[in-house]
Image (cartoon, rainbow, N blue to C red):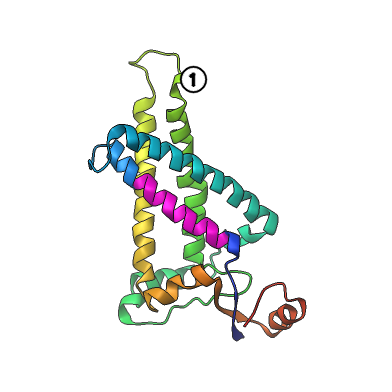
Amino acid sequence: MTTRILMVYKRFERLWHWSQVALILTLLFSGFAVRGIHHLMDFRTAVVVHTTAALALLVIWAFATFWLFTTGDYRHYLPTREGMIAVFRYYTLGIFMGEEHPYHKVFWRKHNPLQAMAYLSLKVILFPAIWITGLAYLTYGFWYGGTVASSPLGWLSDIHVAAAYAILTFVIAHVYLLTTGHSFIAHVKPMITGYDEVDLTPAEEAYLAETRIVPMK
């Protein structure tokens, strides 16, 4: 295997990532205001900001889902059992003992098994839970005609908030892991420039050099 620097994160992927970061932080901040956890924003403004950011994020998710499947990049988010135990051990023990990360990016799989599983869970469980309950809450007046006593708003709100806290937990863990191993800047830089170190087989290196489908340094 040869380590080369090549374009791992395409322009759309980087735009999607940073737009998602900004909108999720906006949703968390405005959501806390709606819940009365802070009063840095009045309730009416918080609802408008929360709703606007949520709809914008839904549009981005729709484009991102279409992009993942049309480009085939969804394969990077499919977890595999190979190396899963080694990566789990690293994050729970090895990282505190100064051990080297057992996983190195390869051309066809840029996420380690644990990352892939976490991202897949985020995309197929937490995100759908957030937007289904959020849209149901937002359009409540159009589809519910029952009594106040039997209103589903209570459990819709509970699921929505629980999913939001789960996403917040993911964000905190994600930022924490950026501070481990290499420097924080070294971890963030690939998502800004798009370039990162990847292990290539001789065949992959020859293929990329000949086809130039991915910029390589």
Say whether residue 61 is left or right of residue 29. right
On the question of residue 79 being in view, the answer is no
On the question of residue 178 being in view, the answer is yes
14 in the magenta segment = yes
In the rendered image, the vertical position of residue 103 relative to residue 145, given as above or below: below
Q: Give the image location of residue 210, x and y in percent.
A: 77, 80
> Looking at the image, which residue is at 47% across and 26% down?
139
> Looking at the image, which residue is at 33% across and 37% down?
46
Q: Give the image location of residue 79, x and y in percent.
A: 55, 61
Q: Amino acid at mark 1?
A: Phe
Toward the viewer: 179 or 112?
A: 179
Say whether residue 90 is left or right of residue 11. left
| Residue at disc 1, secondary structure | helix
Q: Give the image location of residue 138, x and y in percent.
A: 44, 29
Quadrant in the rendering for residue 70: bottom right
> Looking at the image, which residue is at 37% across and 13% down?
147
The secondary structure making up most of the magenta span is: helix
What number of labels is visible?
1
198 in the magenta segment = no
**Residue, disc 1:** 142
Magenta range: 13-28
Say whether residue 154 is left or right of residue 193. left
Q: Give the image location of residue 1, x and y in percent.
A: 62, 85
In the rendered image, the vertical position of residue 35 relative to residue 144, given as above or below: below
Quadrant in the rendering for residue 11: bottom right
Q: Residues within 10 Å of mark 1 (few under 14, many from 20)?
A: few
Identify the image quadrant of the C terminus: bottom right
In the rendered image, the vertical position of residue 22 relative to residue 147, given as above or below: below
> Looking at the image, which residue is at 48% across and 54% down?
19
